[in-house]
Image: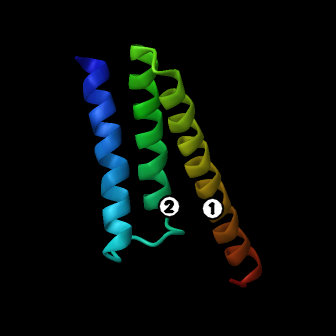
Amino acid sequence: MIAATLGWVGTMGTFAAYVLLWRGKLGADSIAYALMNTVGGVLGGAASAYYGAWPSVASNLVWAAVGMQSIAAEVHRRMRCRRFGVA
């Protein structure tokens, strides 16, 4: 029951991120968008691992890794802007 709930929360989170992006409520470079995708990927991957759905585990963890890389890149960009005053 817990694994299924985590999987559904993860799926709904990534879907919500896409809808918010599509409607212009989030930017593709926003940390919120990347965080929603990262958390969704981790939760979906965890649920998939519980059920032994290994291709889904792999795709969800790659999705989470892309989200983490996006967060790191945006944080780095913001720090550079503060430090050097450039965009």
Which element type, helix, strand or loop, lies under badge 1?
helix
- Height in image: 9 above or below 34? above
Q: Is residue 83 left or right of residue 67?
A: right
- Residue for badge 2: 31
**CB contact under 8 Å: marks 1 and 2:** yes
Q: CA distance from mark 1 to mark 2?
A: 8 Å
Residue located at (49% from left, 45% from top): 38
- Crowding near pointer 2: few (<14 within 10 Å), some, many (20+)? some
Q: Which mark is residue 3?
A: none
Residue 27: x percent and y percent? Answer: 45, 72
Residue 15 rendering spot, x and y as whole percentages: 33, 53
Looking at the image, is mark 1 or mark 2 earlier in the sequence? 2
Q: Nearer the viewer, residue 84 or 33?
A: 33
Q: Residue at x 74, y 74 (%)?
A: 83
Residue sitting at the far right: 84
Q: Amino acid at mark 1?
A: Val
Q: Secondary structure at mark 2?
A: helix
In which quadrant of the rendered image does the C terminus lie?
bottom right
Q: Position of residue 55 (x, y in %)?
A: 53, 28
Residue bearing the label numbered 1: 75
**Quadrant assignment for the N terminus:** top left
Residue type at the position of mark 2: Ile
Q: Is residue 47 above or below residue 22?
A: above
